[in-house]
């Protein structure tokens, strides 16, 4: 088997757990401080510690890293888990503003950053449940 026969996961491309941790931490820092993110910050508990850990476990698994989310939470069912929150274009855009800023700051490889942005954008679009 040659090196070209081995697929490299997004998790590996971006630098693994340490990068996921920094990405999520920066995402929530942006959510906490950007005026444009107030609409989504209001949907969260005052203490972001628990949800921060959940997102780290989810993104680790979603990007091809160790299975940290499903053994504890089961199938993600993200849309179902978020259905109690009104998520329209404004909420999606605010979430993506925070995530894109974090991606820009944390993901050094431009191609990996672009690929991850595209995948996350699709996920954010799919989460909308209001018009």
Image (cartoon, helix red, strand yellow):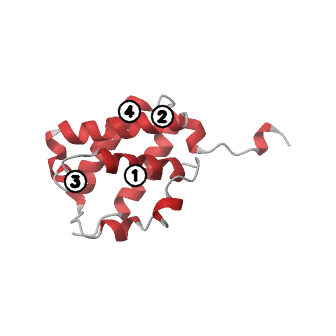
Name which of mark 3 and mark 2 comes first in the sequence: 2
Q: Which residue is mark 4?
A: 104
What residue appears at the point 37 percent right and 64 percent down from the top-left corner?
126
Name which of mark 1 and mark 2 comes first in the sequence: 2
Residue closest to the eye, 111 or 47: 47
Q: Which residue is mark 3?
A: 44
Residue closest to the eye, 48 or 79: 48
Q: Is residue 61 left or right of residue 25?
A: right
Q: Which mark is residue 54?
A: 1
Mark 1 residue element: helix
Crowdedness of circle 1 by 10 Å Cα count: few (<14), some, many (20+)? some
- Mark 1 vs mark 2: in front: 1
Mark 4 residue element: helix
Identify the image quadrant of residue 35: top left
Q: Which residue is mark 2?
A: 19
Crowdedness of circle 4 by 10 Å Cα count: few (<14), some, many (20+)? some
Q: Is residue 129 left or right of residue 57?
A: left
Residue closest to the eye, 113 or 59: 59
**What separation in Å lies between label 1 and label 4 (alpha carbons)?**
22 Å
Q: Assess whether mark 3 and mark 4 are in contact (beta carbons under 8 angstroms).
A: no
Q: Assess whether mark 2 and mark 1 are in contact (beta carbons under 8 angstroms).
A: no
């Amino acid at each position: 088997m040659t090196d070209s026969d081995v697929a490299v996961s997004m998790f590996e491309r971006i630098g693994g757990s340490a990068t996921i941790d920094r990405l999520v931490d920066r995402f929530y820092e942006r959510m906490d401080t950007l005026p444009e993110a107030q609409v989504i910050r209001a949907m969260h508990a005052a203490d972001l510690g628990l949800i921060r850990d959940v997102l780290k476990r989810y993104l680790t698994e979603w990007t091809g890293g160790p299975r940290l989310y499903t053994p504890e939470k089961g199938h993600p069912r993200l849309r179902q888990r978020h259905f109690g929150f009104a998520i329209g274009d404004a909420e999606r855009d605010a979430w993506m503003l925070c995530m894109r800023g974090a991606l820009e700051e944390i993901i050094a490889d431009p191609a990996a950053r672009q690929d991850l942005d595209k995948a996350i954008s699709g996920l954010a679009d799919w989460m909308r449940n209001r018009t």
